[in-house]
Image (cartoon, grey):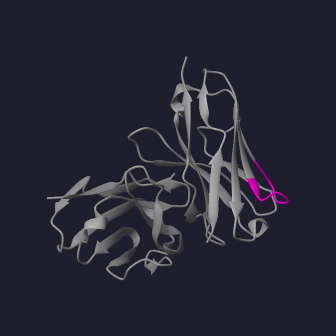
Amino acid sequence: EVQLLESGGGLVQPGGSLRLSCAASQFTFSTYAMSWVRQAPGKGLEWVSAITGNGGSTFYADSVKGRFTTSRDNSKNTLFLQMNGLRAEDTAVYYCAQQLSGYRIFETWGQGTQVTVSS
Amino acid sequence: EIVLTQSPGTLSLSPGERATLSCRASQSINNNYLAWYQQKPGQPPRLLIYGASSRATGIPDRFSGSGSGTDFTLTISRLEPEDFAVYYCQQYDTFGGGTKVEIK
C-alpha cells in the first residue's frame, strides 16, 4: 500500500521559514510526479506546487511563487517544500500527494502536517 | 484561469437516497483532467473519480461520474452512512468550493 508521511509543520512567526518533508514508501517514487496541496482551517483545497518525477521541472501557484520551493531526493524517496516569507494566509494543513501518472490528479494523499503562521 | 463552481453548497439527504452533485467550469475543459474527491472531517481527501467517469481503485460502484465540456456530475446512487462528507471536484490546478452532503 502506498504511504506518504508528512513532517516538519509547526508554529512560525510571519516572515519566517519552514521546511516540510514527505516520506514516500511502497511505490517507485522516482517515476511519479508529486504535489503539495493545502487546506486552510474550515476552507477548501488549494493546490500549491508540483514537481516532475525526475525533479527537473517544478510548478507553483501564484500565491506562493517566489516564496516556496519544491524539491525531491529520489535516493531517499522524500519530497520537500521549503517555505520562506511565511504569511498568516499560509496557515493550513499541508498535504503531499502522489499524482496519477500523466495527470495532475491526486491518487494518494498523506495525512497532512499543520503549519500555523502567527506572532 | 478556469473556475469550478460546485452546487449545491449543502445537500441534506437520508441514507438510501440518491445524491446528485454538480460541478460547472467557467470554460470547456478536457474530461481527462476532471476528478472528484471525498473528504471526511480530520482526514485527507480520497480520490473517487478521475477522467470525469472512471472510478478510482476500491471505490464502490454506487459512485459514478458523468459530464463533459463545462458540466459535470457526481452521483451517489444510494447513500450509505459513511458517504456523508464533503465532495470536491478538481481540474488541473483548480478545486471547486465543495459540496457538503449531510444527514437529513
Q: Residue furthest top?
A: A119
Residue B44 screen position, x and y as percent: 48, 55
Q: Residue at x 63, y 28 (%)?
A: A86
Q: Residue at x 71, y 71 (%)?
A: A27
Which image quarter: residue A85?
top right
Residue A88 screen position, x and y as percent: 53, 26
Q: Residue furthest right?
A: A75
Which is more toward the observer, A45 or B84?
A: B84
Q: Which residues are magenta?
A: A71-78
Residue B20 screen position, x and y as percent: 25, 69
A116 part of magenta stretch: no
Residue B24 screen position, x and y as percent: 36, 61
Which image quarter: residue B80?
bottom left
A58 displayed left or right of A61:
right
A75 part of magenta stretch: yes
Count of picture labels: 0
A104 displayed left or right of A53:
left
B93 displayed left or right of A79:
left
Q: Residue at x 67, y 24 (%)?
A: A16
Which is more toward the observer, B67 or A111?
A: A111
B42 displayed left or right of A8:
left
Which is more toward the observer, A85 or B66?
A: A85
- Quarter of the image that includes the C terminus of chain B: bottom left
Query: Is B97 located above or below residue B88 in the figure?
Result: above
Q: Residue at x 65, y 21 (%)?
A: A15
